[in-house]
Each structure stands twice: as C-alpha cells, then as structure tokens.
Image (cartoon, rainbow, N blue to C red):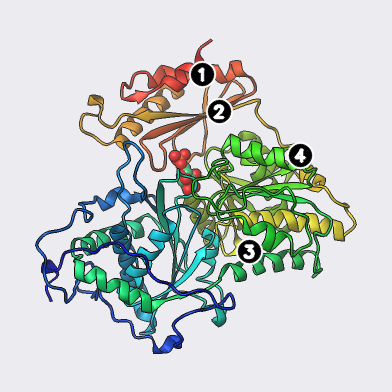
Amino acid sequence: MDAQNTRECFAPTKLNLLPLQDSKLAWAGRPATQWTVFSMYQISTENRASVYCNAAASTSAPSFLEKIDFRKLQNGSDIRGVAVGGVEGELVNLTEAVAEAIAAAFAAWLSDKKKAEGTKKLRVSVGHDSRISAQMLQDAVSRGIAGAGLDVIQYGLASTPAMFKSTLTEDANFMCPVDGSIMITASHLPYNRNGFKFFTSAEGLGKNDIKDILERAANIYDGFSEEKLKESRQVAYAAVKKVDYMKVYTSDLVKAVRKAAGNIEKPLEGFHVVVDAGNGAGGFFAGSVLEPLGAITSGSQFLDPDGMFPNHIPNPEDKAAMKAITTAALANKADLGIIFDTDVDRSAAVDSSGREFNRNRLIALMSALVLEEHPGTTIVTDSVTSDGLTTFIEKKLGGKHHRFKRGYKNIIDEAIRLNSVGEESHLAIETSGHGALKENNWLDDGAFLMVKLLNKLASTRVSGGANGGSKVLTDLIDGLEEAAVAVELRLKIDQNHADLKGGSFKDYGEAVLKQLEKMSDADPKLLKAPVNYEGVRVSGYGGWFLLRLSLHDPVLPLNIEAPSNEDAVKLGLLVLSTVKEFPALDISALEKFTQP
Ligand SMILES: O=P(O)(O)OC[C@H]1O[C@H](O)[C@H](O)[C@@H](O)[C@@H]1O
C-alpha cells in the first residue's frame, strides 16, 4: 500500500448512531468482544503518521480538503479552531476531515503509549459541550478513532472533568476505565469556535503531546482519500457505543457531599441553591447533584444547552455572567448561587447577600477549606493573584502561598511537582476559576470546587453550627484584604508591524519585559517581586503591577492593583513610560486608563 497514492476525501454525512438503552450501553446487539474493527489508518511504529489504505488513488482533492496549517490549531495544551463559518475574518479550519485526522492521530499516539500494556483493544470516550458544531465534530472524531481500530464510547453532552474522570472510574457496566478521552469544547469562546481536550488516566495532555498529535494529524490528513473516508463512516458505525457516563460522574459528586455530612441522604435539605449554567454543559448540577441532596433549586437559570449562548457568556470571569448569577441569587433569596463555564472546569459562587466568591475570593475560600483539613499546606496559584491573598493564606490561615504561572495545567503540574519533592500541596487554583484538588486526583473540576462549598454547608449544619445560609462560607474569608482598584489591560502586539523586524511576537514581548525590568530596577520607589515565575511583577504606591506574555495570544496582559485610583494611575504611568517606546504595541487601553 502506498500512502502517497491514497489521498482524497468524502462527503460529510451524519452517523446513524444507536440510542441509549437503560441509560447504559447500546450497541448493535453484539458483545464488545465480538467487535472486529480493522484499522483503516494502520498506524505502524515505523511510519506512525502515515495513512495506509486500499482505496484507489485520486489525483484531485475536493475543495473541502483545503490545505490547513495544523500547527495553528494548537492552543497550549488544547486544540482550538473555527468550526462554524459566517463570522467575518474567521475562516473555518476545524472541519470534519480535520477533526477526523486529529482523532486518528490521538488514537495513534495513545496506541504508542499503551503498547507496553499488551494487545487489548483500546477504548476512547468522546463527549462534548453545548456548541452548535458539537454533533458534527463528535461524529468526525468517532470516525477517526474507529478508523484507527479503537473502540469509541460516546457520552454526548458532558463536562471536561467528567471526561477526564472516565479514564479513572472502575465500572465495567459503563465500560470504564477508558484508555483515553476526548472532550469537544472551546470553553467560553464564541459560538463559532470549537476544539479538543485530551486525557489519559495519567493526566490531561500537555503542550508537547498536542504538538506531536498535530504533526501526526497533518500527515494523516494529507493521506485522506474519498474512498477511505467513506469507509471510515461504516467502520465508525460498527465501533461506536453510547454510555450515559454523566450518571456515574454526578453520583460520585452526590456521594462526596453525603459522606462529608456523615452519610446523610439529604444533607442539603432546606438549602436553596441557584445554578446558572449559561446554556453550557453544567445544567446537570441542579437536577442530578443538588436535588438528590435535598436542595431547593428553583430560580436556577440557563440550564438548557444552547450553543448560541443567548443569555450571557458562560464564564465566571465575565462581569455580565457574575451579575446574572448575583441577581438570580438575590431575587430568589437563595443561600448560595453557583455559576459554571461552558464545559464545567471553571466555577464561581455568590453568597446569600450577593457577595461574589470568584477570583482571589474563591481562592481564599478554597484555601480556608483545604487548610482546615491540611494545616500548613502549600496553595499553588496563578501569577495574577493579589498581595492581599498571600497575606491571608500565610498570616490568617497559616498556609504557604506559592504564586506560580498563569495556566491551569501549569499550576496543577507545579503542585504535583511540589508533592514529588516533599512539599505538601493539596490545592492548585487560578483566578480564572480553574481549580484542582489532590483528593480529587488533581482533576481540574469546577463542579468539585462547588462540592467542597456544599460539604462545608452540610457538615456545619450537621454539627449544629448553622441552620442555613452561606454565612459560614462568608466568615471563612473574613480578613481578606482587597485592593480598591484592580484592573487588567491587555496590550496587543501587532505581529505584522515593521518594528518586529521579522522576529516573533514572543521575542518582541520579551524585549518589552526586559526594558520594563530595567526601568523598575532604576526607580527607588519600586520593588521587584523577589520570587516571580513569569513577566515583571513590581510593588509600589501601596499596590503592584504585573506585565507578562499571554499564554496563547500576541498580547501583554497588564494587571494593576492599588489602594486608590490615583495610585493605580501612577503605576500605570510608569508602565506606559516604557511600553510607549515599542510601536508594535497597542497601548490605547493603558493611555485611556492613565488619562486624568
Ligand atoms: O495568558 P492569558 O491570555 O491571560 O490566558 C490565560 C488562560 O488561558 C487559558 O484560558 C487557560 O485555560 C487558563 O488556564 C489561563 O488562565
């Protein structure tokens, strides 16, 4: 077989998939062991990225197998792209064929990883959030995995942490654990985007793994042919099973709260908790977690999935989203309001008086809960956390604050590393609302963070400490000092600007940071942070600023916190004096902020 003679494509068609039976498995009436799925992509160790097939060679590639730069689909440890057309300036690059190639590449990558474990047929779970391109991508991904000879288990609407957890759950009825998992999501990005997150039982895949998978995918895509892609639809039809895994995941959350309350069936009886899922995948939390625990959930909103996100962006960092949950909690006189992002790996809450538990406050609250259980432990956070948070964790709670880099994967990996070198850490959490606990296998799970809050409410009442309300949570962050002014301004780097002199935006950004560091060193009123893992963090005028490179974008985010607007402007002016020397930077937001 000659990989070079087999490129072509297929017309996109929906898979005719089988319905769920008894909320468990449904397949074509044959036991899994009798499934004979051949590997269409036949990925060998000698030529892992090549596609071998029997199809007749075709010389003309149809237009929808457009040339795609697969490298551009990498977004740190995720894959992200444009899946829906019609938005000006945003060309579709996450087509069905691209998705199928990426899934086939993941299957090949996984097969290589699991080679040592023997010849058993590998299983991959596939789930998605509420985006309008979810079904199309789920079908394409299923074809890619099945075509590589692996079993596909579709979960349908699911959360990112649930997908990760399916690699750890031991339950043969639900075909768990799976060997690998794919979540189809673009988190809080606009409706036309989509992407993938990948998991094995060891971890969420990192940057290098994603790079490897995209390189393999590009080769697979180059080898696609019409015949082969047609065939992949038939193979997928035979290899796809459906499982209602969210049932397992939500029942584990319910069990966790019951256990924390001393094995009471309905420990939240009488508590009123309002959920805002922003029409993402998090609507399950009201009906499948809170209600079985006895909580009242009336007034919950935007629980139904709607990939056009008609109400607000499902993102706890978004002001409109936080306002929506605060209004709902107050209007319903709820004890607690809970909000999730689209794929439920991020969350935030509001108390009964409408006070937000998000950003530094959510970290303070989670730190208080974790430090009650593990005195003295290290809390790992992202880089934009406040000085007040450090004081709170270290002076009030007796813990250690390890302010690391931005990026949920970075902080989780750092917490795991600290434990491995003998420094105990039980919590890694970002101001974005991402958070992972050691007790929960370091799963980045917004729903589990909220379960920790519910545990506290339930256990406090059991011990006679409170009859309701979220005062016990509010009291836990008493003493957290918060800056009067906290802003984030994002300075864009124009990648096509002549001042880059053909270099990368990263190099340009680094040059800006170097210059800012020089300026700060020369100013006696400023003090550079003695320990700092990214960008330039400087204290002065009773506050601080941090300028750093964005994790993914050609952007330098600038965070400023200060006791007054006047002080914040002074810090802003100092940064402005440096950044204005770099013409490729869009400094308009900073100029506006510092104007008298
Ligand atoms: O560096 P930024 O552009 O601020 O983005 C940083 C953020 O990127 C992604 O959304 C990651 O999922 C977050 O964990 C991270 O905090």
Q: How many marks?
A: 4
* Disc 3 element: helix
- Per the image, the residue denoted by label 2 is 487
Disc 4 to disc 2, C-alpha distance: 26 Å
Tag 4: residue type?
Answer: Leu
- Per the image, the residue denoted by label 1 is 593
> Which of the 4 image quadrants contains residue 142?
bottom left
Tag 1: residue type?
Answer: Phe
Report if the CB atoms under discs 1 and 2 are less than 8 Å apart: yes
Quadrant location of the C terminus?
A: top right
Tag 3: residue type?
Answer: Glu
Disc 4 to disc 1, C-alpha distance: 32 Å
Label 4 or label 1, whichever comes before in sequence order: 4
* Closer to viewer: mark 4 or mark 3: 4
Question: Can you give x and y, in whole percent of width and height, for residue 197 in the image?
Answer: 43, 58
* Disc 4 element: helix
Report if the CB atoms under discs 4 and 2 are less than 8 Å apart: no
* Closer to viewer: mark 2 or mark 3: 2
- Per the rendering, the mark at residue 330 is 4
Label 4 or label 2, whichever comes before in sequence order: 4
Tag 2: residue type?
Answer: Val
One can see residue 127 in this view: yes
- Per the image, the residue denoted by label 3 is 439
